[in-house]
Amino acid sequence: MITISNMTEVQGDMAKWLVAVKDQAEKCQKGLTAFSFLYMVRTGPQWSGDYVANLRLSKGAPDSTFTPGAVHPEASTPYHFRSIKYPYGEGSREAIGYAKRNAAAVFSSIKLGDLVFISSSAEHDQTYGPLIEGNVLNFRSANPSRGAVMARTARQVKLAYSKISESQAQALGFFNLGSAG
C-alpha cells in the first residue's frame, strides 16, 4: 500500500501543471493558426489583391464576407478588375496588410479548442477561390507559388509541425500575425 502524506501539495502541483499545459496548448493553437494564415497571405496569388485581402480568419464557421476592391480601387466593380494597369503579385504588402488587420481581433480572441477557419470568398465575374485552389488559372510569373493555397499550407504545417517538440512549442507561443515567419 502506498501512502501519500503530502496529498495537498501533490494536488497543488498537479493543478499548476494542468494550467501550464493548457496555457502552452493554447499558445500552440494560436501559433499554428498564425503560421497557417501568414503562409496563405504571403504565398496566395494576386492580381487585384482581392483573394488575399479577403482571406478571413473566423471562429465557429467560415466567414464569407467579400470586400471588392479592398486594396485596388479598380477592382471595386464587376468586370473593372480586368482593366487594372498595375496588378499585384504574390507577396504584395497592401493585400497582406489588409488581411492581417481584418484577422487581428479574431486572432486575439482564440481560445484552446476553438474551431478556427481561414477562408476567402473573393469573386468578380465568378467565385475564384475554387479556381485558385484547383490550380486551374493561368498564373503570371508574379505568382510563382501558383494556386492550391490551402493544400500547400496544409503540407507546410504537416512538414514543420507533424510532431511538435518542446522547443517548437515554445517558439509557437511567440508566433502571432505580426511575425516575420
Image (spheres, rainbow, N blue to C red):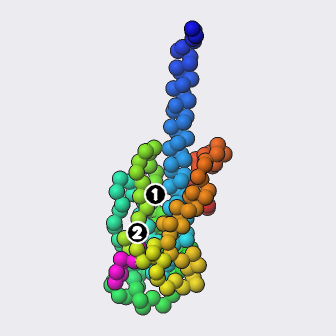
Question: Residue 69, can we see it?
Answer: yes
What is the crowding at mark 2: few (fewer than 14 residues within 10 Å), some, or many (at least 20)?
many
Q: Residue at x 46, y 51 (%)?
A: 108
Residue drawn at x 34%, y 84% is 125
- Label 1 or label 2, whichever lies nearer to me, is 2
Q: Residue furthest right?
A: 167
User: Residue lying furthest front in this view?
Assistant: 1
> Residue 120: which disc?
2
Q: Quadrant of residue 128?
A: bottom left
Relative height, residue 80 to residue 99 (above, below): below
Q: Amino acid at mark 2?
A: Ser
Q: Residue at x 56, y 23 (%)?
A: 13
Q: Residue 35, image x and y in percent?
A: 55, 58
Q: Which numbered marker is on residue 104?
A: 1
**Region rendered in magenta:** 123-129
Q: Nearer the viewer, residue 36 or 100?
A: 36
Q: Secondary structure at mark 1?
A: helix
How many marks overall? 2
Q: Where does residue 164 sit, x and y in percent of width and height?
A: 61, 47
Figure check: 77 above or below 31: below
Q: Quadrant of residue 156?
A: bottom right
